[in-house]
Image (cartoon, grey):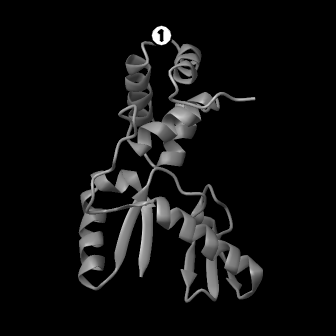
Amino acid sequence: MRTVYLDSVRNHQPTLDHVKWLNSLGGRVRTTPTLPIRMIVIDRRQAILPLDTMDARVGAVVLTGGSVVSALCALFENVWADAVPIGDSTAVDRHGMAPLEARTLRMLAEGLTDEAIAKRLGVSPRTARRIAAELMDRLDARSRFQAGVHAVQDGWLPPTR
């Protein structure tokens, strides 16, 4: 069994206890700053997806076989390849940014609010604001706009077209 969680679980002891239990049974767990969609894939033949991506409690749909399940398997493999094993510390890029910070900076550049960033990262809005403030401080910026300009000028983000 392979599982990918959001990086935010690294700070949640009950989930870490669950991960330890999974590992003891041979499971492997990795984390990533963001997930494209919540899903469960079973034996590469079935996939379970939420009916509402904003509220999984609404219900789920079960897909069987075919190209959709194959595409979801490929999506999982791509996410898995980029995710960091739970026992490892997250690596920083050449600008000293952890993956969570780099993803936050990209979302800031896209114009997302702290609340939207928090939801995508699986953290509280307060944590999203703190990360954004720390990035702005490191970029010597007084506004989000100025942070975006500095990030592009300093090579932290690619220029957009």
Q: Which of 16 and 104 is in front in this view?
A: 104
The residue at 53%/39% (across/down) is: 117
Instruction: Examine the image and state in which quarter residue 88 appears.
Output: bottom left
Image height check: is 57 above or below 113? below
Q: In this view, does 93 lie to the left or right of 50?
A: left
The residue at 63%/86% (across/down) is: 46
Image spot of residue 28 (x, y percent): 35, 75
Image spot of residue 147 (x, y percent): 52, 18
Image height check: is 53 above or below 65? above
SS assignment at label 1 = loop
The residue at 60%/59% (across/down) is: 55
The residue at 57%/39% (across/down) is: 116
Image height check: is 114 above or below 65? above
* Image quadrant in which the C terminus is located: top right
Q: Is residue 48 left or right of residue 123?
A: right
Image spot of residue 154 (x, y percent): 50, 21
Instruction: Mark yes or no: residue 59 visible.
Output: no
Q: Is residue 120 left or right of residue 110?
A: left
Image spot of residue 5 (x, y percent): 43, 62
- Residue carrying label 1: 142
Instruction: Mark yes or no: residue 123 visible.
Output: yes
Q: Nearer the viewer, residue 44 or 19?
A: 44
The three-letter code of the residue at mark 1 reads: Arg
Check disc 1: other Cα within 10 Å, few if <14, some if 14-19, many if 20+: few
Q: Residue furthest top?
A: 142
Q: Which of 66 and 8 is in front in this view?
A: 66
